[in-house]
Image (cartoon, helix red, strand yellow):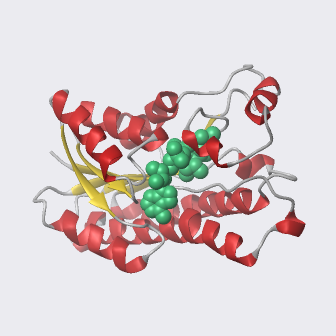
């Protein structure tokens, strides 16, 4: 079959996506940063369900580690036809006066540079002009790119704005190379990313502002990602799907 690489796949939206992609018949490359135990649990679950998966450690903000990860993929003997740029970081709420350059750079290094590096390496392998079979990329952005995040984390919102622009620009650049590039913009999704900070009750406050009056589950985001990667979306590129409860 073919390989789908999911970054940050040991938990949250990435994990849900990895599980669903395996059910669709992909061999799933489960990228993780630190937690090999969690990545192994995802792989075991996939194998128990009759699927195929393997783990790849890499900090996506580190170019050498990203290159090594893709070189490992090259040795697998199956073509890479799907990439989900999912790994991302969000720090605690902060007004702009308190944003350090170090924090801004860390957010951009993971949420933007990491996505660029993985797109670059994937395109080198998927593009028809390089002898590839084509493929599809889904970038996980955020509703924050449209809505901003005043008083909370404008660094994160801006990083996701860059992901949106990357999606648009790259989709145009590689459309004739058999590669589709699309984007999902989740809103409030119940994952551990929200454990990193925020005032008490923040999640409930955000939830109450949503038209659907609830947050989303990682599986609901994964379904959209899997569809965008599939042949059912064969004429869809440069598109954005909002998964934000109507916001
Ligand atoms: P999460 O914190 O559960 O998962 C993020 C994953 O990314 C973790 O496994 C983490 O280890 C990994 N990661 C972080 N930095 C990495 C790095 N440098 N290299 C490799 N892996 C790294 O959060 P999640 O909610 O599942 O987030 C997934 C994506 O969805 C992120 O891009 C996030 O910005 C986006 N998102 C989440 C929400 C939400 O409400 N949960 C809303 C909008 C967008």
At horizontal 64% and vertical 54% (from top left) the residue drawn is 90
Viewport quadrant of the C terminus: top right
Report the quarter where the N terminus lies.
top left
**Figure check: 82 above or below 47:** below
Q: Nearer the viewer, residue 42 or 17?
A: 42
On the image, the x and y values in percent for residue 8 come to 43, 52
| Residue 244 appears in the figure | yes
Residue nearest the observer in this picture, 98 or 86: 98
- Residue 133 in the image: x percent, y percent? 23, 58
Q: Residue at x 41, y 78 (%)?
A: 63
Is 57 situated left or right of 95 in this image? left
The x, y position of residue 120, in whole percent, is 40, 71
> Residue reaching furthest bottom?
64
Is 129 left, or right, of 215 in this rendering?
A: left
Query: Residue 165: where, in percent of width, then height?
Result: 63, 62
Of residue 45 and residue 159, the one placed in the foreground of this image is 45
**Could you tell me which residue is drawn at 63 percent across and 66 percent down?**
107
Is residue 209 positioned above or below 6 on the image?
above
Q: Which quarter of the picture shows residue 194?
A: top right
Identify the residue at horizontal 72%, vertical 27% (top origin): 246
Residue sticking out furthest to the top: 213
> 60 or 139, which is in the foreground?
60
How many marks overall? 0
Residue 182 can be seen in this image: no
Left or right: where 102 falls relative to 132: right
């Amino acid at each position: 079959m073919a390989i789908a690489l999911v970054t940050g796949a040991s938990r949250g939206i990435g994990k849900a996506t990895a599980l669903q992609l395996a059910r669709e018949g992909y061999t799933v490359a489960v990228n993780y940063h630190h937690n090999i135990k969690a990545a192994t649990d995802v792989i075991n679950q996939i194998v128990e369900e009759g699927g195929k998966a393997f783990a790849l450690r890499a900090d996506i903000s580190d170019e050498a580690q990203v290159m090594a990860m893709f070189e490992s993929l090259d040795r697998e003997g199956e073509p890479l036809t799907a990439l989900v740029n999912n790994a991302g970081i969000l720090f605690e709420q902060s007004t702009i006066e308190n944003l350090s350059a170090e924090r801004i750079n860390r957010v951009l290094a993971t949420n933007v540079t990491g996505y660029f590096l993985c797109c670059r390496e994937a395109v080198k392998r998927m593009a028809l002009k390089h002898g590839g079979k084509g493929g599809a990329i889904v970038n996980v952005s955020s509703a924050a790119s449209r809505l901003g995040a005043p008083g909370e984390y404008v660094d994160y919102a801006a990083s996701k704005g860059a992901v949106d622009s990357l999606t648009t620009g790259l989709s145009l650049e590689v459309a004739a190379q058999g590669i589709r590039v699309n984007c999902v913009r989740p809103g409030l999704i119940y994952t551990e990313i929200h454990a990193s900070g925020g005032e008490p009750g923040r999640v409930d406050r955000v939830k109450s502002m949503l038209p659907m009056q609830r947050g989303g589950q990682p599986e609901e985001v994964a379904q959209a990602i899997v569809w965008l990667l599939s042949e059912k979306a064969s004429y869809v590129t440069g598109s954005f799907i909002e998964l934000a409860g109507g916001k």
